[in-house]
Image (spheres, helix red, strand yellow):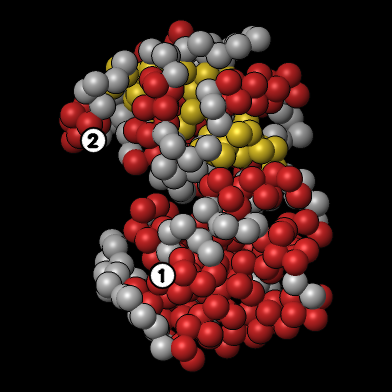
Amino acid sequence: MSYINFPAVIGAGLMGKAISKHYSNQGHEVILIEENLSQIEIASSELAQQKITISDDLNLLRDRDFIIEAVFEDLTAKKLVLKQISDFAKDEALIATNTSSLLIKDLIGAVTIPSRFIGVHYNNPADFNPIVEIIRDEQTDSGAAKVVAEWVEKSGKYPVFCSDTPCFILNRQSLPFINEAARCLNFASPGEIDFVAKQKVGVKLGPFEVMNLVGLDVIKSASRNLEILGEGYASSVDLQKMSEKHWAIDTVTEVNREVSTEIIKRLRGAMLFPGKDILDRKLCSEKDLDKICKLALGYEKSSSEWLQLLDKSIIDQLINSFLSFQSDLS
């Protein structure tokens, strides 16, 4: 296969609908498969203006040359869906997962032709966010990865090749920041933390706005998956205990100077730590990390830029403080 013409998406949740919409906007006739009838009704209403066929019939996958699953971030659920896809897909089809945190090596056993399987992680909101992470397993055919990368680029997005590591690059960079924001709740409100993050730390959306946009269930699940990396990647206890679907973000126009200084220190350390870790481990290029931070995460300056701008002593102090806060207040 030299190009992708007939895509299909499995799962009509938030990500599945956005990915389908993106493909439709590129002129493709898209198949969107969903087993839940109420979800089908919702998707049919929301995507009525798009060239998307929404159905629960897996037989519609038989003529598709690219099929991506976008179901809930759960290993068992995704493996089941991937097995179902393999039962209906033609041998030439590329099968992809939109997982944001699970390892490709843990999913690849669910498909019948591993060489045609690849991670293609669209970031929320998928129809607008320009970054797409591409993750190969050692069994993935290099030609298949090239086809996907070229297709992603022609669709107006920026493909980033990532190592098969928990949460890949984008979530590895962003989740410590989000979880540290949750730890700051013991001395500041969501509105105060978001205000300082946007006005002083330099992000377009505050961490609590991001959590509400992406979905707390997704954030909590991805954060738990990231903990396997050890020091610096622990999930916030307060975040995991959160039972509501959204944070109530208070309107703030000013924050106490002492509180603001503490938030800045905590969030800056949480931004620097994963950036340094990613670059030290050579998980992606500095150029790609810069693109991820600015285009996908909305950072005014990327973690790699801050690592170049700040003195090493300040970097070490911020990172060590972040690690000590995380250890004390997880």
Taking the spot 49% from the left edge, 28% from the top edge, the residue there is 68
In the rendered image, residue 28, in percent from the top left (x then y), is placed at 42, 14
Instruction: Tell me if residue 302 can be seen.
Output: yes
Q: CA distance from mark 2 to mark 1?
A: 32 Å
The circle drawn on residue 123 is: none
| Front-lying residue, 309 or 156 | 309
Residue at 61%, 34% in the rendered image: 158
| Residue depicted at 22% across the width and 23% down the height | 48
Q: Position of residue 320 (x, y in %)?
A: 71, 82
Give the residue furthest to the bottom: 258
Question: Quick check: 192 left or right of 322?
Answer: left
Can I make out residue 37 in this image?
no
The one nearer the camera, 305 or 184, is 305
Q: Residues within 10 Å of mark 1 (few under 14, many from 20)?
A: many
- 187 displayed left or right of 274: left
Q: Mark 2: few, some, or many residues within 10 Å (few <14, many ≥20)?
A: some
Sequence-wise, which precedes: disc 2 or disc 1? 2
Tell me residue 206's x, y (percent). Answer: 43, 64
Please indicate whether residue 33 sits to the left or right of residue 178 in the image: left
Q: Is the N terminus in the top left, top right, bottom left or bottom right quadrant? A: top right
Tag 1: residue type? Asp
Describe the element under mark 2 as helix, strand or loop: helix
Residue lying at 51% horizontally and 80% vertically, measured from the top left = 263
Amino acid identity at mark 2? Gln
Question: How many numbered marks are there?
Answer: 2
Vertical position of residue 244 compared to residue 170: above or below: below
Residue identified by numbered label 2: 39
Residue beneath disc 1: 194
- Residue 172 drawn at (x, y percent): 62, 57
Query: Image height check: is 248 above or below 106?
Result: below
